[in-house]
Amino acid sequence: MKVAWFMAAALCSPIIPPLQAQVRAEAAQERIWAKRPVAERKVSAETPASRQQVAQAMELVEQGRWSEAIGHLRRALADCPDGQTGKSCRLLVNYSLGYCYQLQHDGDADLDRLRRAEAYYGRVLAAAPKHPATRSNLARLQIAVGDAEMASGNLDGALQAFRQSLDLKPDSEAARRRIVSAYGRADDERLEELFETLQSWREQFPEVSRRGYAVIVDRLWQTQPEMAEQALAAYAGVLAAEGWVSEKALAELPREWSPVADLSELIVNGNYSQDDWWKDHEPGLQARLALSLGKRWLAAGRSEATEDCWSSALEEAPRRGMGAAWIQLSADLAALYTNRPELDPEGAKFDHLQSRLFDRKGEAYRTDDLEAIQRLHTVLGLIYADRDQWESNWPSRNAIFQLSHAIDTATRRGSREQVPYQPQAQLKELLAKGYLETGDRRAHSQYLDAGRAYLDTDDLEKARQMISAAKATRGRGTSRDERQLERIFDARRRSVEDAAIFCPSRLTSSLSRGAMRTAS
Amino acid sequence: MYEMTRSPVLVATVAVVLLAALPSPSQAQEKPQALVTFQLAHPDYLDEFFEAEIESIQTRGAQLLASFLNQRIGFIDFTTDAEVGADHVLRVSLDSADPGARLPIEMGLHFVLEGPDAGEALRSYWRLSSVDVSGPIPQEDVLLTQVGLLLNSNVADPRGLVREVLSLVRIAGECEFKTDHPEGWILPFSLAEFCLDRGTRLFIRHGVQAGDVDRDVTLEVEASGSVTEPGPLLGHAFCEVTNEEGALKLEELQTGTVVTKGIYVIEYDPPDDGCSPSLESPTTVTFGSVEP
């Protein structure tokens, strides 16, 4: 049907004069119609009548009679009353005219129809700037304008249209992809501008950013290697963050350029080059790449390759300044040893890893680096909890010691460094579990503490579970703390239920926050 | 860098090099079908549920996934109906990030493709969650809600799935190559029919026969527009070579008789507004408080 419309449109449309002249002629015609005595106007100025005219025009559109539909709408526009009374009539008819021209366009590179549609939508937005359907149509229209400008080689015009589309629809990937594509054909000097843009998109639009960085590398590796290195490091950073690290992901980059060859060697064979060109651009990049790559191999059942990849990365860590990323790497490697005992039958590899983490923690204490101290206690706590190691002969080599120190350090950071309050709900819950496992009477109060922390994170379901767990760990009677927490919990639950009367989704979202938390 | 002249408008006569005729708009090209299955793979899950529950979860999970994939990937028809005889099977399993590990530290969805051209390496993984420290396995509805939440979160990566797994699904077997300016391929469907935005990258595999020698030539192309010349190909998608390597390979196509062997999507760009976007009709649009 649609194809038939376009063919009919092509046959019926008169030869279109230059846009400006045409638009002027249309406006003059509308003025002439508007000057007719009201009695002569075919349709009254009331909205139902203009709706009726629009409906008639849409029937003509359905039959592919574009020119008649547009003529009909122009007359309807002239029939709209002047001033405020006619505002809604003018909005509707201008929207309809924009719609007709936009629909008639559909892939045609002729800009005239698009510009007409743009002009009519512009009139709607001038009176109702936030009108969603007009903004949405105009966002799509600007993409078509940009595509047509690109086809005619007008890159600046294309970029301007794509940016306008993005202003109207800020989450548009299509507009972003086209902006990248347009820069891909622009002069080399403008690629720095693209790089800055990509840096601001990177987190929210990794796919488009990856492509943009690849464009910069491809264009500049021979002429501006420093800029290309920066883009390559950012490209690799996106791969690591999104779990896209693979040999295939490098296929679009120039393999003959040595930094790409370095990256490929690292990803394919786990070999580190001597040249740390990425260190200044993306601190910790190698550790992040190794983490991502190892996880990918793990999912594919290649646990030995993962172990090899992660342990090699840790060996490199002291020389390469991997920052905080190496702590995560250590935690994941320790978990791998726990879950795959065959990789470390004697436990020697785990011991080595553990010693290294303790050395690092000692260093953090010496330099009084509270952030690192907290992070290392947390990681060690999680590692030991994973191994069910709640107690030990050596006082610090167990989960209870490490978790309680992690929680205490977070509190100290709050008072000393004005770090915002950290609820640490999961650590508190884990510590309570440790107390329970070891028969420690502190389990009760620790579960209550975890319950409070979950309330702080708005996770009512987990808070309820913590209160139940606390009840199960105490003897007879109810403690004052427990009653107090229950009262707060009940009040919070009631407020969510009250809110749900007005907004049912709030109840669902609050109760399923636990599931949401894990899923995200 | 290969200089490409990209034009969405084709006005020149199409020089047909390839032999098979493309379907006209009235005979729409059918999308390839893929059967979606969902399996609870981790032993902890299998121990937790009765057999009937497992079957129900797997059936509902497959439906959830097929529906999600149909919304997000428009060039394959995902189905849960085993009777349709789909060429490919997309096996999705809920398992540990490290299948076979002693303790699950993280659960997620593993995707594996089976069917023509699908090798062992074709797999993808989406992280569902870190296993909750308090550990109970959620009941059927909650579990499926979690899977649904994952699909609606930014962890779900349909384009990554295309890149890593679905890029070996042949979406069509025929196309027309036009040799006059702009050089390129006319595909047997429109961009809208297969839910592709401009910029989508495809592989086109050709067999080139010159004398006794028969060789494969695969080119990477980019969907760059649509045919607007009235005629049977009006509205069909048009693709062009956009890189130097492709430009060189183009020359190889001139050396013998060419047959298209398959078209594959390797980098998928879906349209912003989903697979069947439409402008809001003036007959239904409202202007809120502006309108009396």
Image (cartoon, coloured by chain):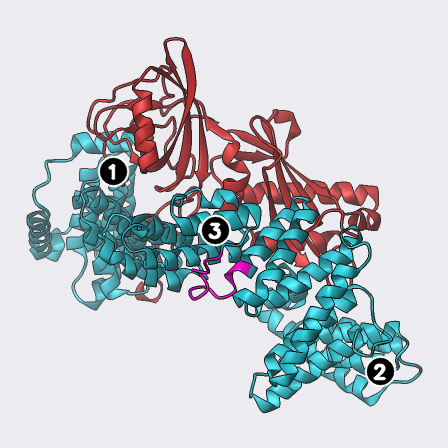
Chain colours: A cyan, B red
Q: In the image, is residue A82 part of the stretch drawn in magenta?
A: no
Mark 2–mark 3 CB contact (< 8 Å): no
Chain hosting mark 1: B
Q: Which quarter of the rendering shows the N terminus of chain A?
A: top left
Residue type of the residue flagged with mark 1: Met
* Residue type, numbered disc 3: Leu
* Residue A442 numbered tag: 2
What is the C-alpha distance between the residues marked 2 and 3? 51 Å
How many numbered dots are placed on residues in this image?
3
Q: Is residue A510 above or below residue B213?
A: below
Is residue B244 or residue A102 the one in the foreground? Answer: B244
Q: Position of residue B39 (x, y in %)?
A: 71, 41
Q: What element does badge 2 sit on?
A: loop
Magenta segment boundaries in residue numbering: A274-286
The residue wearing badge 1 is B4
Magenta span: predominant SS is loop
Question: Do discs 3 and 1 belong to a common subunit?
Answer: no
